[in-house]
Amino acid sequence: MLNSVTMGQYLPVNSPVHKMDPRAKLMVTVLTAVTVLVATNWMGILTVSLWIGLVLAATRIRLVLYWQIYKPLWLLLITSFVFQVVFTPGEPLLLLGLLSLSKTGLVAGGRMLWQMICLLLVAAVLTFSTTPIQLSTALERLLLPLGKLKIPVREFAMAINLALRFVPTLFDESRFLIAAQRSRGADFTRGGVRQRAKGLIPFLIPLLTNIFRRADELAVAMEIRCYRAGAERSTINELKFKLPDYLAVLANLIILIIAL
Amino acid sequence: MFCMPFVQTTKLTHIYFKGTPLETVALKDIDLEIPEGEFFALVGASGSGKSTLVQHFNGLLQPTSGRVSVFGDDISTRINRNSLWSKVGLVFQFPERQIFSSSVYEDIAFGPRNLGLDENEVKHRVETALKDVGLPAGILQIDPATLSGGISRRVAIAGILAMQTPALVLDEPGAGLDPQAKKQILLALKRLQLEKGTTIVLITHFLEDVVDFAGLVAVLKKGELIASGRPKQVLAQPELLLGAGLEPPFPVAFTRKLSSKGVRLNSSPVTIDDLARAIQRTYQNTGPGDR
Amino acid sequence: MVNDSTIALRNLVFNYPGSERPVLDGINAVIKNGEFLAVVGPNGSGKSTLARLICGLLRPSQGQVLVEGLCTVDPRNRIEIRKRVGLVLQNPDNQIVAVRVEEDAAFGPENLNLPSKEIHYRVNHALEQVGLIHLKDRPPQLLSGGEKQRLAIAGLLALRPSFLVLDEPTSMLDPLGRRGVLDVLRGLSGEGMSVVLITHNMDEATAADRVWVLRDGKLAADGTPGSIFSDPVMIRNLELDLPWVTRLANALAGYGLNVPAGIVNTDDMVCFVCRLFKQPS
């Protein structure tokens, strides 16, 4: 059972974004991410923020679900923000002991925080609205020219699909093992660093074994259904670039130019 | 206290992800008492809340509302919850997935060592537990990864038995095993109950096993307790069981089929022998043999 | 052997590498097209190994497996054999490839590089056959165990196989899930699909046309369920678990009511008891 929304989980919703060609979505994702990273002027930042807001609304997925992906990450976000603020040199506005807060620091920290939030949102839109199989098909088609350079594009795409498929499994197995080993008196919080690391063994070893065993069986199930690594595959829903797909990519290109 | 129950729940309700879009009511207003020393069966279809319920018994979960006391202690306090693992052994579904050591001995010894026992006592308990599940001492040094499914299941169960908790909760311990292997596990549990007075709570959907082994049974349906009592009474009600997504024991289902063809037996048999006797009695009273 | 539509096992022997004792030891038998075969035997009797040999996932140590005349060891036959023989595994969770029911059922035909229209047609038909068409947009992870197994069956049906091999498909399911899978298998068998059901549930075996009993790697018995489960000597020698109907027959005999040999499934037994009460003597 899936008990919570995790990164990389597909949410079946009937929305214009869900209906887009996965290749277009992949392109938009990459373009938006690039725009977020290169945007320095306020105009650019504002436009791309609005664009992301528009895309979010178009997915018809409740904002609460987007909020959920930040829950496990907020500590990381705050820490990076603080580090960026503190370690960016500049004219101090405020002195706290040895630490100084400068305007440049605050701006740099704020910009990085904004970038991280945007990148997570963009990635969430892609995975919420695209099944891993669609994603891997899109990736495969877009990267196929690289196949000529002897890069195993198809295997790479399938590997991504399977990795995403295993995310919920990984969560389930972890939850089971924590409960099962705690029932035998395991305590993951006791003692010093070494003891704690040792305390993780009863958890990590079976986690790996179980995941490998499942992956092994999945490999058999795939082989039985005629999967051959690297062979050409068709897809049940033929990919077709339609007007909205062209428009989305075009709009995104314009935003990128504005941001530059 | 002499008559203190193993578990007592009052209006136990458990809601997963309360206040989120994924909110699910897993258990609703469960009032249940499990007497100490009993072999208690908990039955219900998948998703009926059995596994959620028993995780309250060893402190892994606490109720969203309502009360749960285990051996007389309210589990709403952290201190009571944190020590529960040493009083209530919990065997999860497919427990062989929790084996982590490279020898059978080390794995079974994990629980007893966490109890802080000295190595002599640990050794003694490992050996006793292994014998309880019917495995030879010869496998103690073997790598569990090389064992077959049925054997590694029993090794995992031994890992819980070795803690010698006064109560044991087992979630489908026979799932996926062949009938003989399953029976061996159930017999071992019955022996523990009879010889050591261990309270056994067995989650299962094989109602024939409930008839053979349990003294009391409770039926869960979509998070609610819909029946409890002696197996011979509860399990003789095919409509109730089918409504809960369960398959009635063969004799009950058979009697129901007979009555749909117009043949009524003059009792409600739950075991094969009772069924045969009921058929023979009815035959004597009404059948051609009478004439 | 152009028109051969069977699976033939010829003097089949299988050793796992490094192991002295063969898991399967000289099996000679034929699985006919359209039959419903149950394979029973205790854990470790070689049932699962047999399933993997039939599908060509394992290579025989000696002897051969011929699927409609194609030898499983020849790598050139691999895809042709996969198309003809499907295998359902025990654990319902580990056979799911995709995150939508429809995409999962489509995985096989996609691998055959079939056109999208053909895939749609096959997938819809397969999902209808297993009664999952109304769930085609759901994530398979949210299906029940029984529904997952039926999805695994649909994923194979979309490859249009002649033989469906199932390795203990119900042993991890609850009663409703188990019944759903068995109903699907009976339906498919009624439509002419060959079904090989590996099980340790004797009651499931009584639903088959034919039963094989494996013991210590040998084919210890091969016959109709009636002939196998009504034979007390065979049951004792093979240490078989009894189907419920046979247990009832034995109990009735204890009360002086003799059930004729060959009654091993519930419906026949119900008929027998009804006749007992109603027939004038």
Image (spheres, coloured by chain):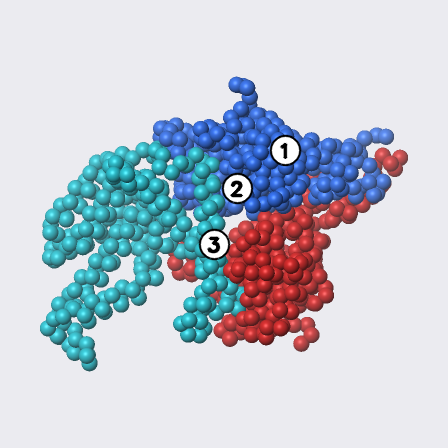
Chain colours: A cyan, B red, C blue
Q: Residue furthest right?
A: B291
Host chain of mark 3: A
The x, y position of residue A12, in whole percent, is 36, 45
Q: Are marks 3 and 2 on the same chain?
A: no
Foreground tag (3 vs 2): 3
Residue drawn 37% across and 30% down?
C113
Which residue corresponds to mark 1?
C27
Residue drawn 69% across and 64% down?
B193
The x, y position of residue B119, in whole percent, is 59, 73
Foreground residue among A2 and A161: A161
Which residue corresponds to mark 2?
C89
Host chain of mark 2: C
Q: Locate the N terminus of chain C by quadrant.
A: top right
Please tell me which of labels 1 and 2 falls first in the chain. 1
Residue type at mark 3 is Thr
Residue type at mark 1 is Ile
The x, y position of residue C98, in whole percent, is 40, 42
Secondary structure under tag 2 reads loop
Residue type at mark 2 is Leu
Secondary structure under tag 1 reads strand
Which residue corresponds to mark 3?
A209
